[in-house]
Amino acid sequence: METHKKHQRNISKNRDAKNDLKKERFEEDLMKLEERLKNETPPSGYVYKYDPNDKLETDPSKKPKVFFKDLAISYKTLKGLTESKFVKMTPIQRSVIPHALANREIIGASKTGSGKTLCYIIPVLEILYRSRWSKLDGLGALIIVPTRELALQVVFLFI
């Protein structure tokens, strides 16, 4: 019986050590994301003017990111985007997402089918992730859309 108790304590210690390692890695990832956001976010008020050839900006620091992998987003979000075949950002996404990730208020207009939905879904997920939101915290975000069709589109992004 005593051997069984020792075995249970060892299992518990191993589980605690694994949880501590996960928390440590999570904290490291968050610190790296925060640092990247600080260094890579365009200045407040900066507006990227779309040029199909992306030659409008010659300054590399002002040139927008083209691929989702270039954004300061978590591995889980990037993995989900890649699995859903989202690799290259549309012009509206290039203009909006870097500002939204920095918790800035944005007004954007673009034609139907241009990728506006991801412009707010990605920042919402990332902000919840960085703030360590969990189900225990209650409602994390409320997204209100004007039509049933758009609501279904948003829901299917999460499935």
Image: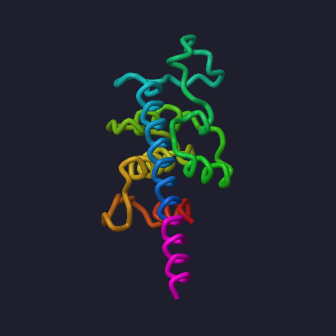
Q: For this view, does 57 lie left or right of residue 105? A: right
Magenta range: 1-15
Quadrant in the rendering for residue 84: bottom right
Find residue 17 and report its horizontal and vertical position in percent: 50, 59
Find residue 91 and report its horizontal and vertical position in percent: 56, 33
Question: Does residue 5 belong to the magenta stretch?
Answer: yes
Up-down: is 24 above or below 70?
Answer: below
Quadrant in the rendering for residue 87: top right
In depth, the one of 58 and 16 nearer the eye is 16
Find residue 102 and report its horizontal and vertical position in percent: 38, 35
Residue at the image point whose x is 46% and y is 53% from the top? 23
* Main SS, magenta residues: helix
Find residue 63 and report its horizontal and vertical position in percent: 55, 20
* Colour setting: rainbow
Residue at the bottom extreme, as displayed = 1
Question: Does residue 120 belong to the magenta stretch?
Answer: no
Up-down: is 130 above or below 35?
Answer: below
In depth, the one of 140 and 27 nearer the eye is 27
Q: For this view, does 66 lie left or right of residue 20? A: right
In depth, the one of 102 and 36 nearer the eye is 36
Q: For this view, does 34 lie left or right of residue 92? A: left
Q: For this view, does 132 lie left or right of residue 117? A: left
Residue at the image point whose x is 37% and y is 57% from the top? 133
In depth, the one of 123 and 95 nearer the eye is 123
